[in-house]
Image (cartoon, rainbow, N blue to C red):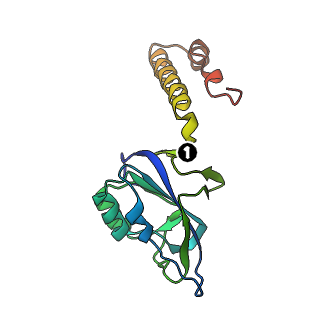
Amino acid sequence: MVEGVRMIGPAFTAKYVPYDRKSPGTVGDFLDSVGRGKVVVIDNAGRTGCTVWGDIMTTYAVKKRLTGTLIDGVCRDIDGIRGFAYPVFARGHFMRTGKGRVQVESTEKPVMISGVKVRPGDLVVGDVNGVVVVPAERADEVAQVSDGIAEAEEGIVEDIGRGVTLAEARKEHGYHTLQSKSK
C-alpha cells in the first residue's frame, strides 16, 4: 500500500482455485470485464505460495480507472504497483506466478476474504489503516454512523487540547456508545 493512497468503490469479485489441467482457466483475463470505479476483490483462499496480481494487471487497472484491488493472497511487482500509486491490499508479496498453480473459477459471485463475505457490489473502502467491506444495502447507514464517529472524535481531540481529561471528553461526546454492536 502506498502512503496516502485510498480506495473506495463497489466490489467486482473473482475466486481462484487450484489449477486443473483438465479444464484450465485463466489467471487474470477477467480484468477485461471489470467496469470503471470498481474494486477488484480476489479470493485466492489466503494462498501465499503464488501470486494473482502484479504490475501488468495494475497497468491495465489504472488504464481502466479501477479504484483498487483487495487480495486474500499475495501480489508481486511491488515497485511497479507503487509507481502507479494504485492501492493493492494483500497478505504480502511473493514472486512465484499463479500461472499453472491457480485459475479463476468464477467472477461476480460471493467470495470470502479473510473470513469476511464479499458480494458483487458491496462497498470496499481501504486506506493505510486497512480495508472495510460494507454490504451494499447498508452503505448509507454505515456512512451516517461513520460521520457521527468522526465528528465525535474531532470534538474529543479539541476538548483534550483545551485540557479536558480523556474520560470526560469521551463521556461528553458519547464516544463509548458510538461503536457498540447493539446499533
| 9 is higher (above) or lower (below) than 84 | above
Identify the residue at image location x=40%, y=69%.
54
The C terminus - image quarter? top right
Camera-side residue: 177 or 159? 177
Counting from the top left corner in percent of width and height, residue 68 is at: 41, 53
Q: Is residue 172 left or right of residue 86?
A: right
Identify the residue at image location x=38%, y=65%.
32
Bin the neighbour count of mark 1 within 10 Å (Cα to Cα): few under 14, some 14-19, many 20 and up.
many
Identify the residue at image location x=63%, y=51%.
117
Q: Is residue 54 left or right of residue 101?
A: left
Camera-side residue: 37 or 67? 37
For numbered disc 1, what is the local secondary structure? strand
Q: Is residue 84 left or right of residue 152?
A: left
The N terminus - image quarter? bottom left
| 135 is higher (above) or lower (below) than 158 | below
Camera-side residue: 99 or 179? 99
Identify the residue at image location x=64%, y=23%.
176
Counting from the top left corner in percent of width and height, residue 168 is at: 59, 14
Q: How many numbered callouts?
A: 1
Q: Is residue 71 visible?
A: no
Q: Amino acid at mark 1?
A: Val
| 100 is higher (above) or lower (below) than 16 | below
Counting from the top left corner in percent of width and height, residue 153 is at: 50, 24
Report the residue marked by disc 1.
Answer: 133
| 165 is higher (above) or lower (below) than 38 | above
Q: Is residue 62 visible?
A: yes
Residue 88 falls in image quadrant: bottom left
Counting from the top left corner in percent of width and height, residue 67 is at: 38, 51
